[in-house]
Image (cartoon, helix red, strand yellow):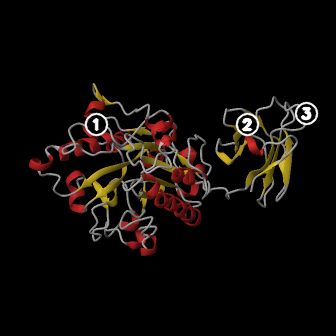
Amino acid sequence: MSRIMKCFAWLSILIVATAMATADTPVRIATYNMQYLNSDVGNTNKYGDRLQKLKEVVDLLEADIIALQEIDDRASLELVFKPAQWHLIIDDDSGDKQDVALAVRTAWSVPDFSTSEHAEDKDFLFPSSADNTFFPNRRDVLVVKVQAPQDKAELQILVVHEKARSGGRETTEYKRVGAARKLVETIEARFAETPFVLLGDFNDNPDDTSLNILETGLPNAPGGPEEIDGPFLLNLTEPLCAQGHVSYGLKSNDIEGDRVITIDPASRDRNNATRGTDDDNAGAILFDQLLIPAWMRSMYVADSARVFDGPAAVRGNDQNRASDHVPVYADFVLVAPEDVTPAAPAGTLRISALMPNPDGADDGQEQVTLKNSSSQTIDLAGWTVKDKAGNTFNLAGVIQPGADMTIIMARPAFLNNTGDDVWLVDPSGNTVSPVHYTGVQVQSGAWIQFN
């Protein structure tokens, strides 16, 4: 019995109000690239017990919602997912062997697919042929609204499968970067106040340019290792990358006892070392990720993002292994639409300038200028300035609408004169307005301006 069905059985026995209990029940959302799943997967002469392994992975994953990539058609999905137990959303007419799809437990509803679970152009973000460079065929972004049982909490699921690195990492990067830029534009326009999860196979890891664009919302964000939350989207798998976890490239020899060792200590360095080259052999790497709006942080169950480590996911050889990817998942506690706190307008409060090297001693004299571009007065109580090393400075006072405020940070110096990353942290713990400067920009008594 699945985790969610067990939960509802327990609720019915205790005769607890379902709506109230569901709001406190974690929802598991996963992403899984099933490596060219087709309706021949049940052919044991060709694929051995691959189908049984896929079923075992799905069962052990205990997810309520699973984003899927590399699906041939509905018939192949129905071999793994019983239609009586799952809503299966896919474009039945695409003819493409790499469709994205979504599987949702039937305890949930998919309001926009109440009469048919066939996905059409209107259900994708970029169906126009003009967008095929970045979102080829039905590797477009599938958008499905899901609704929790009874309590009516809603969530938009955005399923993505970015262009692979085959053909050269550097040669193909413009497609992943272009896709990220278009996603930022569309998310800002359509989902600013909507809870959503963007998830799938990005064919880049959290350090790469395309993911840094999605995390910051900045179209020219550089590639490179960083672990700053947001401020545009929170990459829930970024801490996994920092720990060395991978979701692609694991094999039978990674099984130890009753679990898969999903850490490759060299993965992150290997990926960073080949950035800017056409070396497309990523080895084991974290390609599969989940991102949410920064303001949704409170709905995420802290530290619940995981790489699936059940041996069924990697046992076997290249022919009968379940997939060359393993699922990645996270847990959430959703709220009803009327309880959703809408996102604050982007750029409401930002760092507009820094003076890391004042004339004379730096201690107690470093300065930051903040800009309030909103029409509201902002109380700085609970806000902090933070740098890459984890140093913080607590802010105080209020900034009037449209005004600037320059603050002398009366504490031991922490803004490095050799360059640093600096950002604001709001009272809810969200990262706001990350800025970067280099040692070349640092001059005695001079301000470093940011757009």
Foreground: 370 or 36? 36
Q: Could you tell me if the residues under marks 2 and 1 are in contact, i.e. CB atoms within 8 Å?
A: no
In the image, residue 96 sits, relative to residue 387, either above or below, namely: below
- Examine the image and state in which quarter residue 106 appears: bottom left
Residue at image x 75%, y 35%?
416
Task: Give the label, 2 or 1, closer to the camera.
Answer: 2
Q: Earlier in the sequence, mark 2 or mark 3?
A: 3
Task: Give the label, 1 or 3, closer to the camera.
Answer: 3
Residue reaching furthest to the right: 360
Residue 57 percent coordinates (x, y): 27, 42
Label total for image: 3
Residue type at mark 1 is Lys
Q: Residue 360 has which mark? A: 3
Foreground: 111 or 181? 181
Q: Earlier in the sequence, mark 2 or mark 1?
A: 1
Whole-number angstrom distance, CA of label 2 to CA of label 1? 43 Å
- Examine the image and state in which quarter residue 311 appears: top left
Q: Earlier in the sequence, mark 1 or mark 3?
A: 1
Q: Could you tell me if the residues under marks 1 and 3 are in contact, i.e. CB atoms within 8 Å?
A: no
Residue 210 percent coordinates (x, y): 52, 54
**Quick one: SS at disc 1?**
loop
What is the crowding at mark 3: few (fewer than 14 residues within 10 Å), some, or many (at least 20)?
few
Circle 1 residue: 251
Residue at image x 45%, y 49%?
204
**Residue 60 can be seen, yes or no:** yes
Residue type at mark 2 is Thr
**Residue 157 can be seen, yes or no:** no
